[in-house]
Amino acid sequence: MPILPDVLQPQLNIVFCGTAPGTLSARRGAYYANPGNLFWRSLFEVGLTPAQIAPYEFQMITQYGLGLTDLAKEAYGSDSALKKSDFGPSELHAKILQYAPKILAFTSKRAGQEFLGRRVQYGLQLEKIGETVLFVLPSPSGLARSHWSMAPWQELAALNQQCGGTQIQAGS
């Protein structure tokens, strides 16, 4: 049984795919629930949401053309605690083909690497799933703060606009 439900519907602008829910997210039943996680703040700061969404409001993200899933649906914890067998790349591939978002954005290098089966750099990847382009972001987790940069998140927001998605001006 999934730790957190997918938040998917056809033809979203961006689906964010994490590695797996963190321990606090699993306990609270909400994506990116740790107060030290920068996910929700980053969406707002780069103009993908008009206000900072609270983790418990995660289901409302689809109204902004965004969706959520994880590569490991039945495991949780820090990346270092996850085993290769926890990941479901073929399941994610099938979901993306079914729902056809414009962009699949991995919210960590580990998620991108596990899915693609190779080392990745931040940013747009060469591979596609159908017409969906793939993008890798630095993890917003507090545990990954030493690797944090807002620049790839800003690049994702710009790519979203290029793909026909909307960008919201902060405060509008």
Image: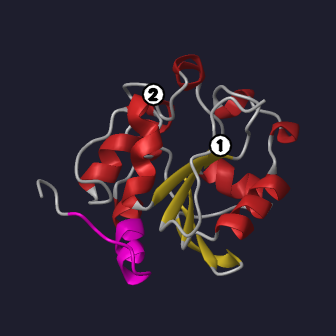
Where 126 sits versus 113, above or below? below
Q: Which residue is mark 2?
A: 33
In-image side of 58 versus 82 (left or right): left
Q: Position of residue 80 (x, y in %)?
A: 70, 31
Q: Is residue 39 magenta?
A: no
Quarter where residue 41 is shown: top left
Q: Position of residue 79 (x, y in %)?
A: 66, 34
Report the number of numbered marks: 2
Res 53 → quadrant: top left
Q: From the top left corner, tell me how far across and down residue 43 is, in percent.
A: 34, 51
Expressed as whole percent of the image width and height from the top left, the position of residue 5 reads 63, 37
Q: Is residue 39 left or right of residue 110?
A: left
Q: Is residue 29 above or below residue 155?
A: above
The amino acid type found where label 2 is placed reads: Ala
Between disc 1 and disc 2, the foreground one is 2
| Residue 107 seen in render | no
For numbered disc 2, what is the local secondary structure?
Answer: loop
Decide if residue 84 is in sight here.
Answer: yes
Which region shows up in magenta? 155-168
Q: Residue at x 82, y 37 (%)?
A: 86
Q: Tell me the quarter of the image containing the C terminus.
A: bottom left
Looking at the rendered structure, the secondary structure element under dot 1 is loop
The residue pinned by badge 1 equals: 19
- Residue 32 against residue 48 in the figure, above or below: above
Mark 1 is on which residue type?
Thr
Q: Is residue 53 above or below residue 167?
A: above
Q: Nearer the viewer, residue 45 or 49?
A: 49
In front here: 145 or 33? 33
Residue 96 placement, left or right of 22: right
For image coordinates 37% across by 58% down, the residue present is 64
> Residue shown at 37%/39% (left/top)?
38
Q: Which mark is residue 103?
A: none
